[in-house]
Image: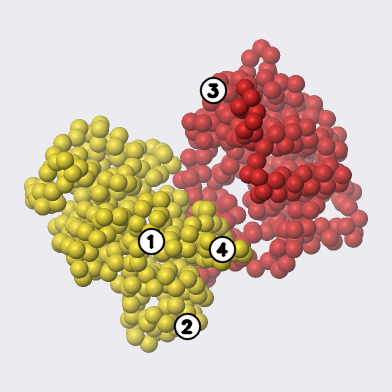
Amino acid sequence: MLKKQNSGCPDINGKQWEALVFIARESGVLARVHHVLADKELLDAVPDFVLKHTNAAKMYADKQAHQVKFESALLSEIIKNDQVRDFAFMKGAAYVLSDSPVAKGRTFSDIDLLVSKSQIEDIERKLVVYGWFQDETSDYDQRYYRQWTHEIPPLRNNARGTILDLHHNILPPVSGRAPNIQLFWDKVITTSSGSQVFSKPALALHSLTHLFFQEEFSHGFRDLSDLNILFSSVEKEDDFWTDILELAIATRFETELFYAYRYCKLIFATDFPPQFVDKIGQYSPGKLRLKMLDWLFLRVLLPQHRFSDIPLLALANTIALIRGHGLKMPLHILLYHSISKLFLSINFLLTGRDGKNPPQNEEQGQ
Amino acid sequence: MACIIGELFGCTGKQEVRLGDLNFGQVKKAMANEGVAIDLGIASFRVRSKLTPVVKNFYSLYASHTLVGDDQPVDFHVKVKSSSSLRKWIYPQVEFVCDQHSPFLPLPKSQAYPVLEWGMNWCIATHCHNFLLIHSAVLAKDGKAIMFPAPPGSGKSTLTAYLANTGWQLLSDEMAVIDTNTGLVHPFSRPICLKNNSIDLVKEWFPDVVVSDVARDTNKGDVAHVKPPLSSLEGIGSPAKITAVVFPKFDASVDIEIYQLDKCTAFLSLAENGFNNNILAKDGFSALVSIAEQANNYEVNYSNMDEMVSFLDDEIENLN
């Protein structure tokens, strides 16, 4: 439909416009639709109904972008000192801070920040002073995060409600695919406004590995759309294309880069430079595997709404869930984790204990 | 099934079809299937439910509202449904669904109808950022609008119900919808939500008003909704200028006390009652400042309704 709009064809009826708005709203790209229309000077060509919604979404996205700049400036000040120089904003926050075209109309649920593993606990302690607290988590969840994953439980600013995710790597160590994070640290740049973010190739690579390691794709279309915009905004001759390939090879994410290329091409008809296309093809998985992945991704990466009429979507989402979990956790740990969670749920159902509050007798003993 | 409503538009040759033009059976069937699309001026809702209390109360309270044509787009698709599995039968619960998501925790089935109203408020408050939204009633006389911002418990809804049925035009009970470009407030007429004692009081004052079933034991106490008068719906689409802002507070210990507020206090109090002024940032701030500056601002503690109405009538008369 966007393509139809882009060619200026007005023969879309009221119900179809309604479907467009609903699908875009659900997929988190409604504000982005506004910017696409504005860039192509089509704001006058669409009905008021559509503008009403895209405009409202744009207001919300603008406010969030503003808030991200404010929060990251504050966070940079709090975290930076003689001991701590290594930190970098990632994904949504990084798009805004680097004035990327991806930031236009983008909304966020949290701010992602990469810090050094050795300093993560110190930083966490310092943030408490400035009102960043963890929501109540059980002992099990704490162990889960700190022992197995690449991040600590999310922090929430108690005054503003903003959520901050502190990471020390881009994938859980327990997955066996966590890269040598120094390779990403080497790509940190400072923007003209003084924020620390990944360079464009590293930013893109991180976003695409994040997408293709996901277990849940409700934002899959939005995330792929981010990549489409990012790739489309780079000149064909730019060093970006060799840099991203080099980084992907060094961090062993060549296959994921291939997926990003393939599905951007198939879903968004993204234009890639020929020299990149020549080199990326060798990282394709085998024919059969590719067929299965196409079946999966050409479902879960589409806007997930009932108006999109995607056949067997629920099945595809279930398979994606299993795949995502399987990628992030080896089977024996996944089994342990699943059984523990099941046991904890039964325990809570029967006794009311959720592992978050100390048991009665311990309190009395003090 | 879509044809029943479509046919009505076709056969009656009417431009506008009201919900009350359909019989209850047709509405029940529609709500169980493709839903009934209702026009509320600033937004439209396609409402679905298989629960009889929801259908029954919706039908009686929205009878005078116009329907949206079958081929026209609708802003929100909402549904009130029973929770699935065990909670359908044991201590039954209902859920509000906006498009594909349930934004709230389920509530007891006895609150099924208010859940629809609260859910519709939520849809507007979380999506309609093309307007500045303030928690406030808005009523007008002689084309001049007065805003009544107030937190819950201030008696605002009782006052609203009284004024709406004594010659004032109801623009809104819960939510003032303001265009930040023009500064005008748009009509958003929906059933008035009454709580506890005011339900019986309003029934006593106006025996002919249509009132929903009473939902007991909600977190606001007893809750019922009152059908807005026809006159308020005739204003749909015509925005009005805000000429006064009155912060009402029911206080049994005084007849009436009227305080004129300075612009700064008025601005701060308005901002406190804002739903999305923080999202509208500069536009929201400027719009609130304009309202505080252009309007006469008062805080009124009262228990004597006649005195209150008299004050408001005088205010309208003196305003130019």
> Left or right: A281 with respect to B162?
right
**In the image, what residue occupies the spot 90% across and 49% down?**
A282
Instruction: State how far apart marks 3 and 1 are (Cα).
Output: 44 Å
Mark 3 and mark 1 on one chain: no
- Element type where label 2 sits in the image: helix
Q: Nearer the viewer, mark 3 or mark 2?
A: 3
The reply to whether dot 2 and dot 4 touch (C-beta < 8 Å) is: no
Q: Which mark is residue B215?
A: 1
**B33 is higher (above) or lower (below) than A152:** below
Q: Is the residue at mark 3 from the same chain as the one at mark 4?
A: no
Percent of width and height locating residue A360: 62, 33
**Element type where label 3 sits in the image:** loop
Q: Amino acid at mark 2?
A: Cys
- The amino acid type found where label 4 is placed reads Ile
Mark 2–mark 4 Cα distance, whole angstroms, equals 37 Å
The mark closer to the camera, 1 or 4, is 4
Alpha carbons under labels 3 and 4: distance apart: 46 Å
Which comes sooner in the sequence, label 2 or label 4?
Answer: 2
Residue behind mark 3? A130
Query: Hey, what amino acid is under mark 1?
Result: Ala
Q: Secondary structure at mark 1?
A: strand
The answer to whether marks 2 and 1 mark residues whose Cβ atoms lie closer than 8 Å is no
